[in-house]
Amino acid sequence: MIEADDVPIRVPAAKPEPIVLEGRYARLEPFDPARHSNDLFAAIVSDADTRHRWLFDHAPETPEALREWMERVATSADPLFHVVVDRAAGRAGGRQSLMRITPDHGVIEIGNILWGEGIAGTRIATEALYLTADYVFETLGYRRFEWKCNDRNAPSKRAAQRFGFAFEGVFRQHMVVKGENRDTAWFAMLDRDWPRLKAGYDTWLDPANFDAEGRQANPLRFA
């Protein structure tokens, strides 16, 4: 344990494991290419090039191409990939990863997010983020949870702030991705933020907040 500014800092944090994270609407499962690739391809094939516009990888042209890519990254510890399973449908609807994992400083990032149209903007995707943040802070003990994106990716920036990440600025000319300059917008939530944010998620994810078609009664908000 290290003392800094009279606040105890417990490092290193634990490394994330390829485990299942179970929620009411969503389930995060480690990549299993043989089991997940066909469902995941079906979930992301609609407007695939647009959905991959800001990602590091390119849109797969076939289920076999997606499976080959999944096989290459499935054993990676950083990034550590999960599929997002729609529990009601029983099939993969998207994917995401934990990445840039720095246990000695207690810092970790969520990235490589690709939620298909069936779950994007729904309680499934929101719960996937919630399950990840809860795992990062409460199980693994990280101090800082980051979200980064291309500064031109307006939907990603809106999503980050909706989920409770605070905007911290833009790193200009931060990367070259797919031959293009990337100015990177940085967002983060801290361990001290999580109790307040978690309460907001718990309220929003309550089944009483949704009608039979899954429409929310009240938006996600944090006190």
Image (cartoon, helix red, strand yellow):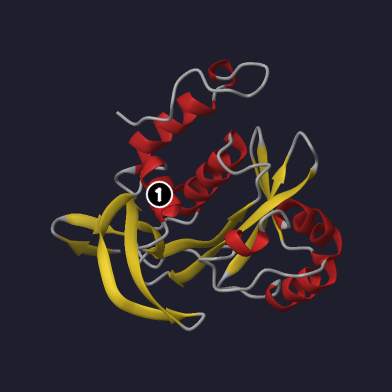
Q: Residue at x 42, y 69 (%)?
A: 103
Q: Image quadrant of residue 148?
A: bottom left
- Residue 156 seen in this snapshot: yes
Q: Position of residue 123 (x, y in %)?
A: 58, 34
* Residue 50 percent location from the top left of the image: 59, 60
Answer above or below: position of 99 versus 132: below
Q: Is residue 86 left or right of residue 210?
A: right
Please identify the quarter of the rendering in which residue 62 is found: bottom right
Q: Which residue is mark 1?
A: 160
Q: In the image, what residue occupies the spot 59% across and 59% down? A: 51
Q: Report helix, strand or loop for mark 1.
A: helix
Across and down, in percent, residue 2 comes to: 25, 65
Q: Is residue 154 left or right of residue 41?
A: left
Quadrant housing the C terminus: top left
Residue toward you, 144 or 7: 144
**Residue 171 image offset from top left, x and y in percent:** 27, 71
Residue 209 versus residue 24 in the image, above or below: above
Residue at 67% of width from left, 53% of height from top?
94
Residue 18 is at least partly visible in this image: no
Q: Is residue 116 above or below residue 18?
A: above
Mark 1: amino acid: Ala
* Residue at far left of view: 5
Count numbered badges in the picture. Answer: 1
Relative depth, front residue between 152 and 157: 152
| Image quarter of residue 152 | bottom left
What residue is rendered at 40% in x and 65% in y? 150
Mark 1 surroundings: few (<14), some (14-19) or many (≥20) residues within 10 A: many
The N terminus, quarter of image: bottom left
